[in-house]
Amino acid sequence: MADVILDSVLDIIKTVPILFVVYFVVGWLETRADAVTRVVTTAEPLSPLIGALVGAIPQCGFSVGCSALYCRRFLGPAALIAVFLSTSDEAIPVLLANGAEQWKTVLLLLAVKLVVAIVAGYFFYFFVFRTRLSEMDLPDEELDTEEIDVSCNCVECSGGSLLGFAISRTVTTCLYLLVTMVILNLIVYAVGTDTLSKFLLNGTIFQPVLCALIGLIPGCAVSVLLTELFVSGAISFGGAIAGLSAGAGFGFLLLFTDAPDRREAMKIIACTYLAAVAAGVILQLLL
């Protein structure tokens, strides 16, 4: 149990630098709303592609950072889904730790998840989330840092200080994530990996469905668990893709907590899950 709590703390510590940088950048962007709004809305057609490429970087903090950008309306929902789908968290280091021969599997995993993220991202961009950032309630004027509103989580709340805003939001978010992660990891610990392996129905078409459900559990530990199950042969490549594609580290937690529209947040999570299941099932049938 001590190891579970320690792992949770270490996961959060690895996320702190990225969260701080993201919140600092978000605060800076909000003070230049006019120019940023023009750039963001102009580049939006490329956002699913860019999101997929960013998510492919093997670092669990990027999904959280992109969730923060979405919650501040600097990133569209389809682009965020692409980030979630391409994120692999700790899967790549775990695979490489199991032997140098695993590099082919790593390349295949990255390539498949990248393709899934791009295809699904653009599908949702054109057919599901039709409202564009230019049509959303984006800031349309410069922030007045002399008027401080203590009821919101923005730069004004920190006295106009970008550093204060970034530190405050990072500490608050990390504390929330830490408490939640300890609880979730203790539940996974109590259930046990052997039980999870049996639950995942190895060799059946339903395995990607169940693996994706496991992947929805927030935290880097889940990607480690799924990767170890794949390496041991307990789940197939299709199951691994489904689970790792549905997994978004701490991204889902921050999204559900800070999203301006909870219904859209749930829709984003549902779309991520369905895309992950579809990819896993297709691979299960082909391989």
Image (cartoon, rainbow, N blue to C red):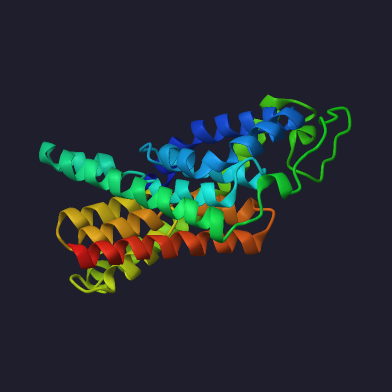
Q: How many marks?
A: 0
Percent from the top left, x then y, of residue 253?
54, 54
Percent from the top left, x then y, of residue 251?
50, 49
Q: Is residue 127 above or below residue 160?
A: below
Q: Residue at x 41, y 61 (%)?
A: 275
Q: Residue at x 23, y 65 (%)?
A: 284
Query: Viewed as shown, does residue 286 lie left or right of 67?
Result: left
Q: Residue at x 29, y 74 (%)?
A: 206
Along the line of sight, the residue nearer the viewer: 57 or 170: 57
User: Dividing the picture into quarters, in which one does residue 226 lie?
Assistant: bottom left
User: Dividing the picture into quarters, in which one does residue 138 lie?
Assistant: top right
Query: Viewed as shown, does residue 180 lie left or right of 170?
Result: left
Quarter of the picture holding the N terminus: bottom left
Kindly give the residue lying farthest to the right in the view shown: 147
Query: Viewed as shown, does residue 2 lie left or right of 61?
Result: left
Percent from the top left, x then y, of residue 36?
69, 31
Task: Residue 233: tell me if it is visible.
Answer: yes
Percent from the top left, x then y, of residue 177?
53, 49
Quarter of the picture holding the C terminus: bottom left
